[in-house]
Structure formats: C-alpha cells, structure tokens
Image (spheres, helix red, strand yellow):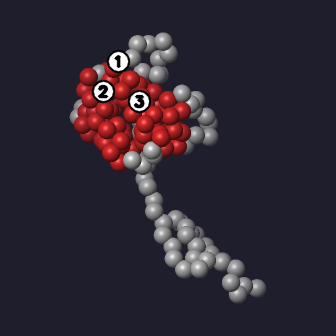
Amino acid sequence: MDVVQLAQDLTPYATTAITAYGAAVLARVESDAADTTISYGQRILRRLTGRDTPGSETSAAQDALADTVTELAGTPGDADLAAVLRVQIRRLMTAHPDIAADIAEWARPAAPTTVTITTSGDRSPAVQTNYGTINTGDSTT
C-alpha cells in the first residue's frame, strides 16, 4: 500500500466534508440524506482523528489533524491548509499503518469534483447540464 498515494486520494473527500459541515464534521452524525462523498469524508476524518471509537486515547498526530480540520473549516478553499491536511493524513497513516489499512479497504464513492460554470450577458443562463430548452422569458408567447 502506497501511503503517499492513499493520502493524495483521501484528501479531496476530507476537504469536501470539511467544506460542507465546517468544524462540526468531526461530530456530525451521518443522516440518510447526506451526500455519499461527504459521508465518506466524514468517516475518513473520524477514523483518522480517533473519533470513531469514543473514549479511546488519541495521539498527538490525531489531535493535530483535528486542529487542522477546524482551521480549514474556518477558511474553506485555502490551498495551503488543504496541503497541510494532506501531509498530516500521510504522516498519520505512516505512523498508524493499521488505520491506513482499514481505510484502504473501504469502498470509495466517485471522486469529488469541482465544476465551474461561467456565463456572460444579460439574462444568460448558467447550467451544468441541460436536457431541454432554456427559456429566459424574452419574446415568448
């Protein structure tokens, strides 16, 4: 198992969950309506920070990761903090190969993606996918 690649693969899920729920991502209970990517990110973060087992001792690396989650939640989209998160995930999994092995065995949902949609002009619609006609209301009967 390549821990560096695993950390690289897991970080987008973790940051997606952090962006969605903020610092509460470590304590938030999964709901049936939660997006699978976000739920997977939550599960990763709870396992990495030791919050998946109530009452268990956490290491300094797990506490540092939890602090980074809180900091990243306060400034979502910060590329530097996302890089710090990735490095901390890699270090933690290197120090705790049992955690890395557990997570590596989990089925992963489709990788999270970022979509940017740009529009210009008056009343120009901005959509990701359109399967029909878009009517802006101009000159229609």
Give the residue drawn at x 56%, y 31%. Answer: 28
How far across and down, in percent of the image, does residue 127 sit? 55, 67
How far across and down, in percent of the image, does residue 4 sit? 24, 37
- 20 to the left or right of 93: right
First in residue order: circle 3 vs circle 2: 3
Give the residue drawn at x 42%, y 28%. Answer: 66
Quote the CA–CA distance across marks 3 and 2: 14 Å
Give the residue drawn at x 42%, y 21%. Answer: 50
First in residue order: circle 3 vs circle 1: 1
**Front in this rendered view, residue 121 or 97:** 121
Nearest-to-viewer mark from 3 and 1: 3
**Front in this rendered view, residue 8 or 65:** 65
The quadrant in which residue 30 appears is: top right
Residue 27 in view here: yes
Q: Secondary structure at mark 2?
A: helix
Quote the CA–CA distance across marks 3 and 1: 13 Å
Q: Looking at numbered disc 2 in the image, what kind of residue is underneath it? A: Leu
Residue 36 in view here: no
Query: Does residue 36 lie above or below 127 as drawn?
Result: above
Check disc 2 and report the residue beneath it: 92
Nearest-to-viewer mark from 2 and 1: 1
How far across and down, in percent of the image, does residue 34 sit? 58, 40
**Front in this rendered view, residue 33 or 105:** 33
Check disc 3 and report the residue beneath it: 67
* Quadrant in which the C terminus is drawn: bottom right
Check disc 1 and report the residue beneath it: 59
The quadrant in which residue 101 appears is: top left
